[in-house]
Image (cartoon, rainbow, N blue to C red):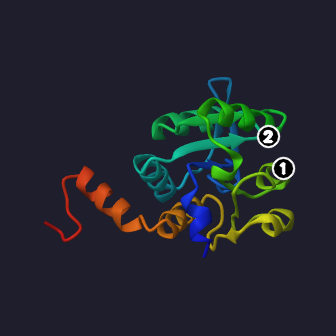
């Protein structure tokens, strides 16, 4: 569980991509002589990111490499911010984004898995790690998910934040109402 006071400050949920939003696998090939790259994304993670946005969070993807597959999925989910820094220098790009949005580092939750995430995790208000994260990341984390990256870890982290804020039931209600349903099935 995470501290409710810390969770209540969160305005932005930052997510590493490879190994957090994806299962860390990259499929490369050629199609019509062009390089193509495929990644696997978890549907429940996608639903949770949409739910987080609906509940007023800014959702940011912060990757240490560029990928068309990442760009396509982020556009499909209408992710608020997508940072793809080929040099895996995430802090400068995030600093610019936070300044532009008027959000402080203490108002950020970040879910990471590998060494490129360490500088970010050292700055954020709520550092989180996925189950398959490296030891250096897990040591910095206030919480480590039970799920591994690409297999529901993002959903778990978002649900954890909303529950710590006391807003999970509201989020479920909003999700169902958006679809013309009610929590009691009517």
Q: Find disc 2 in the rendering and name its residue.
A: 91
Find out whether the residues at labels 2 and 1 contact each other: C-beta distance under 8 Å: yes
Q: What element does badge 1 sit on?
A: helix
Depth check, front residue: 162 or 62: 162
Q: Can see residue 81?
A: yes
Q: What x and y, as percent, mark residue 156?
A: 55, 66
Q: Mark 2, residues whose alpha carbon is within 10 Å: few (<14), some, or many (≥20)?
A: some
Q: What element does badge 2 sit on?
A: helix
Q: What x and y, as percent, mark residue 6?
A: 62, 63
* Among numbered discs 2 and 1, the one appearing first in the sequence: 2
Q: Can see residue 151?
A: no
Q: Which mark is residue 26?
A: none
| Rendered position, 158 above or below 2 | above
Q: Find disc 1 in the rendering and name its residue.
A: 119
Position of 143 with respect to 86 (left or right) is left
| Rendered position, 85 above or below 58 | above
Depth check, front residue: 79 or 171: 171
Q: Residue at x 66, y 37 (%)?
A: 98
Q: Quadrant of residue 29?
A: top right
- Quarter in which the C terminus is drawn: bottom left
Q: What x and y, as percent, mark residue 3?
A: 62, 71
Spot the residue most to the left: 186
Depth check, front residue: 60 or 130: 60
Q: What x and y, as percent, mark residue 117?
A: 79, 51
Q: Residue at x 56, y 49 (%)?
A: 11
Q: Quadrant of residue 127?
A: bottom right
């Amino acid at each position: 569980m995470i501290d409710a006071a810390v969770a209540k400050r969160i305005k932005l949920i930052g997510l590493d991509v490879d190994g957090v939003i994806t299962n860390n696998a990259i499929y490369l090939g050629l199609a019509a002589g062009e390089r193509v790259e495929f990644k696997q994304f978890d549907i429940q993670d996608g639903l949770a990111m949409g739910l987080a946005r609906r509940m007023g969070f800014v959702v940011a993807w912060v990757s240490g490499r560029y990928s068309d597959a990442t760009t396509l999925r982020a556009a499909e989910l209408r992710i608020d911010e997508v940072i793809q820094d080929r040099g895996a220098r995430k802090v400068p790009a995030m600093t610019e984004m936070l300044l532009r949005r008027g959000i402080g580092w203490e108002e950020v939750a970040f879910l990471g898995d590998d060494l490129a995430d360490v500088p970010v995790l050292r700055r954020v208000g709520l550092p989180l790690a996925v189950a398959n994260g490296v030891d250096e990341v897990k040591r910095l984390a206030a919480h480590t998910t039970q799920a591994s990256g690409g297999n529901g870890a993002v959903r778990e982290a978002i649900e954890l934040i909303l529950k710590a804020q006391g807003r999970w039931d509201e989020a479920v209600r909003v999700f169902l109402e958006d679809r013309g349903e009610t929590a009691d099935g009517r």
